Image (spheres, rainbow, N blue to C red):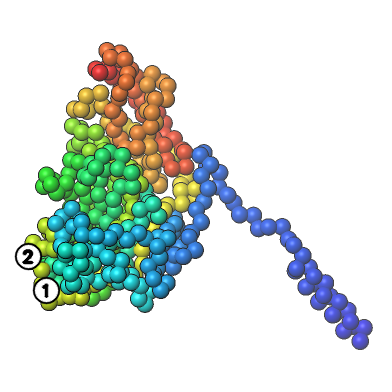
Amino acid sequence: MKKLFILILLLFVMVGCESTPTEPIETEIPSVPNGLLPLSATTDCAVPTLEGGWVCIWADEFDGDTVDETKWTFEEGGFGGGNQEVQYYSRNNAEVVDSKLVITAHKESMGGKLYTSARLNTKYKGSFKYVRIVVSAKMPTGRGTWPAIWMMPLMSVYGGWPRSGEIDIMEYVGYDVNRIHSTIHTEKFNHNLGTQLGYSRLYQDVETTFKDYEMIWTPGSIQTFVDGDKLGEFAYVPHFNQDVPYNQAFPFDQEFFLILNLAIGGTWGGAQGIDTEMFPTAMEVDYVRVYRQDYALTDKEAPTQPTNIQLAQLKNTVFWNKSNDDYGVEKYAIYLDGAFHKYASLNQMIFTGLTVGNSYQVQIQAVDFVGRVSEMSETLSFTFSG
Ligand SMILES: [Ca+2]
Ligand SMILES: [Ca+2]
């Protein structure tokens, strides 16, 4: 009896011990030069992290009963998307069914148009820069369809289309079955000039199976993928763009928002007419996930020294070889005569407002996302010409 009592007492003591507050487990918060903290994944993303330090910061799994208007805005009307498209966009053409966004085009008259469809964007609700976006989607069927997963600039700081850029992660025209396109438009490279930069490739079963349409966007680089297979790669190369400010070639250093739509007809989608028998036809989207690199946890090394700093064809402009870094160079610090002057987001700098005829000693230092800096570059002597 006494033994049993002792045993029970011991059990109580042990349980008591376990429930006593203990020291919190030490989680090591990395100390980085610019004080950046680790990211927390958004709770509504089914895949909160991806290998390589990517953390989901925005997502829609389309698990509700309706389109979540805290994340999406409907663009409604018969404006034709700037491409003479023939649909009228209505919110009635988008619904959430079985954890998927379904955008359906119908043959029905509305607002002077013969067809209806839907277009949604994340403007002011989700804007992103230097992210990885994964969209699982299934293309509609039919000649005359033109669905897209694409991005437009939030603030258009370099001016109206195409000066502030457009990123077409994925475009599809129904008359060219199974061919996926990926394109960027900028002031120097756009479809009005016939100079847009694009890639396209044939895939299989894009109208019957869901595929991951993906973009990885880092400073000076945009890559696109279909089910992990690289489709497009766009990079800023200052040597080949010496004649223009970097933003005319590559304005992708600003925030962009996402757009999902299914256009009917238009300059491209309607190039081979519209099959009036195909309706209704739908693009389905299973999820949209946006990831950002968790630099605070992943980045361990300083960037390499910028090299080969030289004068560009464009006056008062210098460019240099891009620095390498374990997780990317966020910006370059430009020094004149040993004093900090300005940051440049890519490896080109146009000087303004200096003293005409004065010579300056230019040096460049690369800065990564956690604030680690490279060694200072060699010096370039440069005379400001006004
Ligand atoms: Ca889903
Ligand atoms: Ca680094």
Residue 264 visible (yes or no): no
Residue occupying image coordinates x 83% and y 72%: 13
How crowded is the residue under tag 1: few (<14 C-alpha within 10 Å), some, or many (20+)?
A: few
Residue closer to the observer: 80 or 330? 80
> Which residue is under mark 1?
276
How crowded is the residue under tag 2: few (<14 C-alpha within 10 Å), some, or many (20+)?
A: some
Left or right position of 365 against 311: right
What's under tag 1, amino acid-wise?
Thr
What's under tag 2, amino acid-wise?
Gln
Work out which residue is located at the far top of the displayed protein and give it: 357
User: How far across and down, in percent of the image, does residue 62 sit?
Assistant: 39, 69
Residue occupying image coordinates x 29% and y 59%: 75
Left or right position of 374 against 315: right
User: How far across and down, in percent of the image, does residue 7 sit?
Assistant: 85, 80
Residue closer to the observer: 296 or 180? 180
Residue occupying image coordinates x 11% and y 73%: 276
What is the quadrant of the C terminus in the image? top left
User: How far across and down, in percent of the image, does residue 199 sit?
Assistant: 18, 55
Mark 1 lies on a secondary structure that is: loop
Circle 1/circle 2 CB separation < 8 Å: no
